[in-house]
Image (spheres, rainbow, N blue to C red):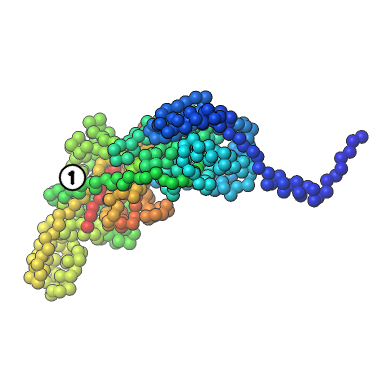
Amino acid sequence: MTSKRKKNDSEICAKGKKKEKREETAEISELIVDSDMKDKVKEAWTKKLQYSDGGVEVDCHPFPHGVLKNFIRSQTFMENLQTELLRLNFHEKSNDLYKFKQSDDLNKRKEPHITGLRAVLYEEFRLWLTEVLQVALEPTVDISCAKYEYTDVLLCHDDELESRRIAFILYLVPEWSQSDGGTLDLYSTDENFQPQAVVKSLVPSWNTLVFFEVSPVSFHQVSEVIAGDKCRLSVSGWFHGRSLERPPRHVELAAPRNPHLPRDEELLFEWINPVYLDVEYQTQVQEEFEETSEILLKNFLKEDKFKQVNEALKQAGIQWVRRGPPNQRCYERAELHSLPPCVSTCWELLSSEAYFLLLSNFTGLTLHFLASGSEEEEEGEGEEEDDGGDNDEEGTAGSSGAPQTGAAAPQQEKKGKKEKVKEPSTPVCRGELRRWRHGDYTLVHDTDLHNTEFALDLLLYCGCEGWKEEFGGFTSYIANGEDEELLTVYPENNSLGLVYRDKDTLKFVKHVNHRSSTPRGPRPLGSAFYDFSFVYYE
């Protein structure tokens, strides 16, 4: 009979401690570290040539990058690494640029296979990159784990930040195809170093490592994951070094501001729900707006007018132009000359002098020099005697609540007796009619000249039948430098959203995801929604 000596508690404890600290060794594929292979990759990288052989690929179009298949020699190591990674705590990450789940910093993890991966990346692979790419890399490496699942996405960006020199992604995915989404898309750039179009898509594959040079033109994205039953698991990060010289950042010209159109209040009576032309109701709207700096006015247009516009927007004759660049925005804008008559008239309504005055009544803002409550009028009232109260509502509304466009002139004449009247500036605004479909979005960016001053934003929605919050497409307002949302405006048919923002408040339209393109209830497959987007200035 065989027997085994019973282990004492101290031995068991000692063994447990040793196991906890154990590191599993990872080795890079022999092909990748082969001397001849390294020389060929080095030559291709230096001369900016394309090279591919046995699962090793280097290409400099549209910017320098490499693909290393079967990166780690041991399949068992990778499977165990995947198990450890999936046991981590993941945090939902969502803002204008992305939506996915991310782990904490992997530099702090003690798991044996995660520790082994860190060792091979930080030592052997860092030295390989230094030798092959001929670039000095610091010992400091950023590394984390990401999970992309259905509708998760990372939109167009260049990765330039804090001395990042080489980016890397190691995939631990099931069998994957381009139709599943989640590809690493690389963008071409124009003469201003701005991204233009996706020219190459790298499909994730098990145990494949992709690396690329971080530069002013390294624009890329992770396309939206379309597969509903797959997880795009990866380990990614950056090797640091001396950043490449960056050219001056391109700044777009500000969109032109257009003066109001000389249309009178008859246009308001024809188009707007009479409720909103009642002077008492306008007072209620203004009180609420002054309290919160935002308001949503439902059923804003008359029902028959809204139906006309809603149907006309779906006509094939409207010319839609795609707006970019994709590191700032991706949606379609209507060419005004191609609008059907009723849509064109609705545009005129939102640009009209009478509408400027109506918005002034709604908000208490001086969007037109005839609007009441301006600082000049208040100063005049303090300096001069009361004239009998005849002008209490001049420039505000008649009995119907519709603005009167010529009523403030007497106040200006009185003030001119004491001081020279300043020539009133022409009220201006800028606007777009936009179409939103699957894949569209806008991003917050630091060169946006439109977000450097106080302004009133207007959104009037059409085509939103069956639209749900989970589809995206909503407009979010955030404080500069923060991710937390201050306000969200959701698409809703015939609803007018008004938001007053300061120069430190930014906005974006959340990526319209794949859920919006599946047939649900009254919403047909692949349908769009629309908005009139205007900005008015005091």
Kindly identify the residue that appears in the image at 42 percent across and 52 percent down. 483
Numbered disc total: 1
State left or right for residue 421 relative to residue 365: left
Residue 202 picture quarter: top left
Q: Secondary structure at mark 1?
A: helix
State left or right for residue 391 relative to residue 54: left
**Residue occupied by mark 1:** 348
Kindly identify the residue that appears in the image at 58 percent across and 31 percent down. 29
Neighbourhood count class around disc 1 (C-alpha, 10 Å): few under 14, some 14–19, many 20 upward: some
Farthest right residue?
A: 1
**Three-letter amino acid code at the position of disc 1:** Glu
Residue 352 at what x, y percent from top left? 17, 49
Kindly identify the residue that appears in the image at 92 percent across and 34 percent down. 1
Kindly identify the residue that appears in the image at 31 percent across and 57 percent down. 502
Farthest top residue?
A: 54
Residue 125 at what x, y percent from top left? 54, 38
Query: Is residue 322 among what the camera can see?
Result: yes
Residue 86 at what x, y percent from top left? 58, 40
Query: Is residue 407 among what the camera can see?
Result: no
State left or right for residue 409 relative to residue 51: left
Identify the image quadrant of the C terminus: bottom left
Residue 253 at what x, y percent from top left? 24, 46
Front residue of 112/431: it is 112
